[in-house]
Amino acid sequence: MYMHWMNTMVGYCGPYKYDTGYCQRLKDYIIRNLHWMEGQMESGEDPQYWHQVRLALLQLRGLEDSYNDQILLPLGSFSLNPFGFLLFNLGGDLEDLESALNKTDQSRALGSGSCSALIKLLPGNKDLLVSHDTWNNYQSMLRIMKKYSFAFQASPQADSPIPGGVQAFSSYPGSIFSGDDFYILSSGLVTLETTIGNSNPALWKFVTPEGTVMEWLRNVIANRLAKTGKEWAGLFSKFNSGTYNNQWMIVDYNYFTPGKTDTKENLFTVLEQIPGLVMVADKTEELFRKGYWASYNIPYFEPIFNASGGPELVQQYGDWFSFDLNPRAQIFRRNHSQVTDMESMIRLMRYNNFMEDPLSVCQGCDPPHNGENAISARSDLNPANGTYPFGALKQRLHGGTDMKVTSFSLYRDYQLLAVSGPTWDQVPPFQWSRSPYSRLLHMGHPDTWAFPVVWVCWG
């Protein structure tokens, strides 16, 4: 946890040079939000929801207390350090809070992708594979695969366990949820997302500390309490914070039978969130009709796309920002039919042949081939002295940092196949000592990231 903090968070709002105005606004926002949630917990309304919020915050407080070598049992009200381990869990929310709270130098480059996802029906519907690539800064690559088994009740008065009491997910030191996000749940659900962001400044007025619950917490609550995709969407939609704006995909394996072709609903739910608006739809029929669902950081629902500033980005920068013609949309559409088994699924999710693939060519870039334009990005391979129309296409210490995939046969035992680090299937392995970023902190990291796929199973 110390190494991950030093690699990723040590300069955020202290202790040295930082944006003091923004950091004070952020601290005030977090404290007001925590106070509002504490009031809700004490109100007695919606006891299941707020009981799970309290349990999650108590878990985070316990983690922080143990790290600080102190034993405390918070009774009644309790407090969290707004700039302690809460920042680990707020990572995604912070990207949007920076915009909403007018941070001078923002972390997110224009167009910056955060994850690729693919849900794929194999030929004859013999299996349903669910896969996710995290895209992140390479300093974040200290990773932990976690499995939680919580004997929680739905509420203090309930005598029934929560549906999602057992969860397996990819995660980070100091984080009590995934953050990527990719979860296998005892409810039979597999939940995952890719970030869609918000480029419409007029929507930030919906980001307020009262009446909202941060995205990471709403994610935790929905994963614990939901039995179905529809329930998950309903729980997650409550108290929309307008931060960490994502497209969520909820696969309910309870509705999948290998070889069956007449499933019409409930198997696959899609949810998109932006400030002030959440949209949900059952996309089971579309999944069966097309054979796949791909997600690549661009909104699917037209009202979400329009409200979040999508048309303006297309008008200014071209097809790269469009839902159908983005490079990853085209690569998934061209290549998904090549997926016939687990091996070919992994190959597609690690795909980056940017120097030879015509779909990786970037309009207005010099050189034209771009490492961002692939299923698993390698933006570190873009030349520093190139010319690029917007920030996401520049040379950055950013790209696909992992791959996870599960299946009908694997999910029941919370198993998955995973690989850590940037792709090296068709490009050179990432090596800190030979990269332009060798002097940046990467405590605890190996020098060369050239790891095989591992089978994650639990004893």
Image: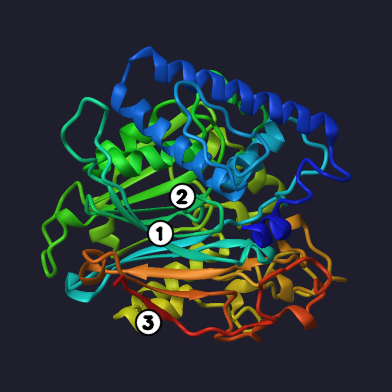
Q: Is residue 417 left or right of residue 440?
A: left
Neighbor class of circle 3 (other Cα within 10 Å; few <14, some 14-19, many 20+) is some
Query: Do the numbered discs 3 and 2 sit on residues whose CB atoms are within 8 Å?
Result: no
The mark closer to the camera, 3 or 1, is: 1
Q: Residue at x 41, y 78 (%)?
A: 346
Residue found farthest to the top:
43
Report crowding for label 1: few under 14, some 14 to 19, many 20 or more residues within 10 A (C-alpha): many
Q: Is residue 131 left or right of residue 173?
A: left
| Contact, mark 1 vs mark 2 (Cβ under 8 Å) | yes
The residue lying at 47 percent from left, 33 percent from top is 73
Disc 3 versus disc 1: distance between alpha carbons? 22 Å
Label 1 is placed on what type of residue? Phe
Distance in Å between CA atoms under marks 3 and 2: 29 Å
Residue at 28%, 38% in the rendered image: 225
Task: Inspect the image, locate mark 2, and give the three-letter code of the amino acid beneath it.
Answer: Phe
The image position of residue 345, as x and y in percent, is: 38, 76
Of the two numbered discs 3 and 1 on the same chain, state the one appearing first in sequence: 1
Residue labelled with disc 2:
177
Q: Quadrant of residue 253?
A: bottom left
Q: Position of residue 7 (x, y in %)?
A: 71, 60
* SS for callout 2: loop
Name the mark on residue 344: 3
- Who is closer to the viewer here, 452 or 259? 452
